[in-house]
Image (cartoon, rainbow, N blue to C red):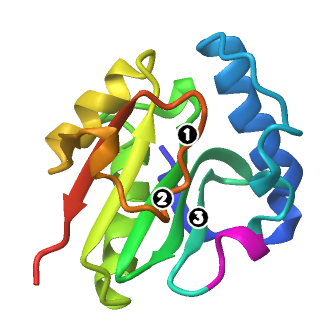
Amino acid sequence: MAAVEIEIYTEGYKDDVARLILGIQNNEFNISITLAQQPDLEEIPGFYQVGNGNFWIAKLGEKLVGTIALKDIGDKQGALRKMFVDRDHRGKEWSTAEKLLDTLLDWSRQKGLAEIFLGTTAQFLAAQRFYEKNGFVEIEKKALPGTFPVMEVDTKFYKYTLPR
C-alpha cells in the first residue's frame, strides 16, 4: 500500500483543494458554505503562505486526500485552518491527519511560534477528539487573540502551546 505524502501547496492544486474541502463541508457535514464564502481558498499563497504561515496538502499518488493550513496571526501565534481529510483516508491505517498536524507543528517550532489556535464546528466531533488527543485544550472564544480569524460557523475553540 502506498503511503500518504505531505507537500507544500502549489497553485496547481487550487481546484483539487477547493473540491476536497467543499465536498466535505457540504456533502459530509451538511454545512451550507460556498467557495465565495471562503476567499482564502481563492488566494492561498497570499493568505496563508506569508510570514510564518503555510499550507500543506496530503497526497496518495496523484490524488489529493487532505489539507491543513497555518495562518500567521502575529505575536508568535498561528491559526490552524482548513484541516480536512478525505473520508476514505482517515484513521490509523493512513495516518493522514497525524502527518498533516505533525508537519504543521514541526514548521511552527522551526518558526519559533509559541501558540496555535483553532476554531471548529460542533458537527466535527471526531476532529475535536483528534485535537484533544494531540494536546489542544478547549478555550472560550473570548480567550482567542484579537488577530484570530473567527469563522462564522465555528463554535468551539482550542489552543496548543508549543514546548519551549
Nearest to viewer (mark 2 / mark 1): 2
Give me the disc on residue 59: none
CA–CA distance between discs 1 and 3?
11 Å
Question: Based on the displayed image, in which of its 4 quarters is residue 133 positioned?
Answer: top left
Query: Mark 1: which amino acid?
Result: Phe
- Do the CB atoms of the residues marked 3 and 2 lie less than 8 Å apart? no
The residue that appears at 46% across and 25% down in the rendered structure is 121
Q: Which residues are magenta?
A: 45-50
**Residue holding disc 3:** 56
The residue that appears at 65% across and 25% down in the rendered structure is 24
The residue that appears at 64% across and 83% down in the rendered structure is 50
**Residue holding disc 2:** 148
Mark 2 or mark 1: name the one nearer the start of the chain: 1
**Residue 154 at what x, y percent from top left?**
49, 31
CA–CA distance between discs 2 and 1?
19 Å
Task: Give left or right: position of 153 versus 3.
Answer: right
Instruction: Say above or below: 109 vs 139.
Output: below
CA–CA distance between discs 3 and 2?
20 Å
Query: Mark 3: which amino acid?
Result: Trp
**Residue 60 at what x, y percent from top left?**
61, 49
**Residue holding disc 1:** 84
Quarter of the image for the C terminus: give it: bottom left
**Residue 38 at what x, y percent from top left?**
77, 44
Label 1 residue SS: strand
